[in-house]
Image (cartoon, rainbow, N blue to C red):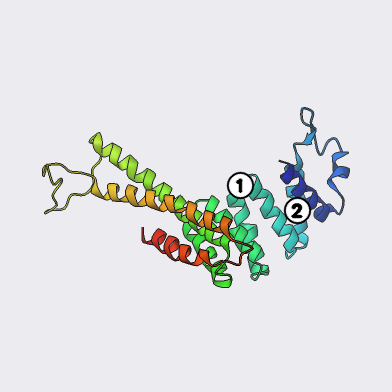
Amino acid sequence: RLAVHRIVRQCCAIAVRQPLDELARQRNTVGMDTARGQQHDCIAVAEPLLRNHLQQFPTDVAAIRMLAEIASRIGRYSDAENPLTRRLELAPGVKAARHNYAVVLHRNNKPVEALGQIDELLAADPRSPNVRNLKASVLARVGESVHKFATDMRLLANLKEIEEPFEKNQVGSSAMAYKRNPMRCERMTGLARYVISILSSPFQTAAEQWFERTLDDSSNKRLTTPESFLA
């Protein structure tokens, strides 16, 4: 919450050229939370001011960044996408902007788009541990969704409410040929668990780096990244 208020102060400083403290004196504009002494309408004040400012100065990269950061900090990731896209159009070479865009896409359940942005970051800096960790997180999130879907399918199959396709010459079970096991979903859950388990390895590797001068990350990433995609 304090981080949001810090961002809002910066937003208001850009939009109206005065600190938020002066706006807070206007009782009809910004209210106070008497229990905690915090401004509870800061976002409601700063966001319209920023949007009005951007109508006059649509290429103000700092204001665009702050508008996107407000939306992402309070969980409105869909609202953060457009400002971040605009920021990348104005400053395509800024790595931090592309990294933030990838994070927002990841949190907004858009793994394919997020991986595209991550690949561009890795093309510019292949050894960045933060970007590699973000890539592992996106893949693990995909594994989580796949696992949940396949598990629900298996449970519904057990209740005879749904069944997997059964091929003409398919054998159900080695011991009981008449059984119709959900083999595809079983494979999906097994591989998804493996992808999720790999997630800890890139983070441990990044934590172990000695001033980013050792090369023990090379052998690790040659396994974790390809095997995550293979699974």
Name the one closer to the observer, 221 or 14.
221
| Image quarter in which the C terminus is found | bottom left
Marks 2/1: CA–CA distance? 16 Å
Horizontally, is 128 left or right of 194 in the view? Answer: right
Numbered disc 2: secondary structure: helix
Would you say 96 lies left or right of 170 here? Answer: right
Residue positioned 73% across, 63% down in the render: 61
Tell me the amino acid under the disc marked 2.
Answer: Leu
Label ID, residue 199 = none
The three-letter amino acid code for the residue at tag 1 is Arg
Q: Residue 134 falls in which quadrant of the image?
A: bottom right
Q: Which mark is residue 50?
A: 2
**Residue 35 percent location from the top left of the image:** 77, 27
Q: Position of residue 117 (x, y in %)?
A: 54, 64
Report if the CB atoms under discs 2 and 1 are less than 8 Å apart: no
Residue 108 in the image: state x and y as whole percent. Answer: 53, 51
Residue 112 location, x and y as percent?
A: 47, 60
Q: Which residue is mark 1?
A: 76
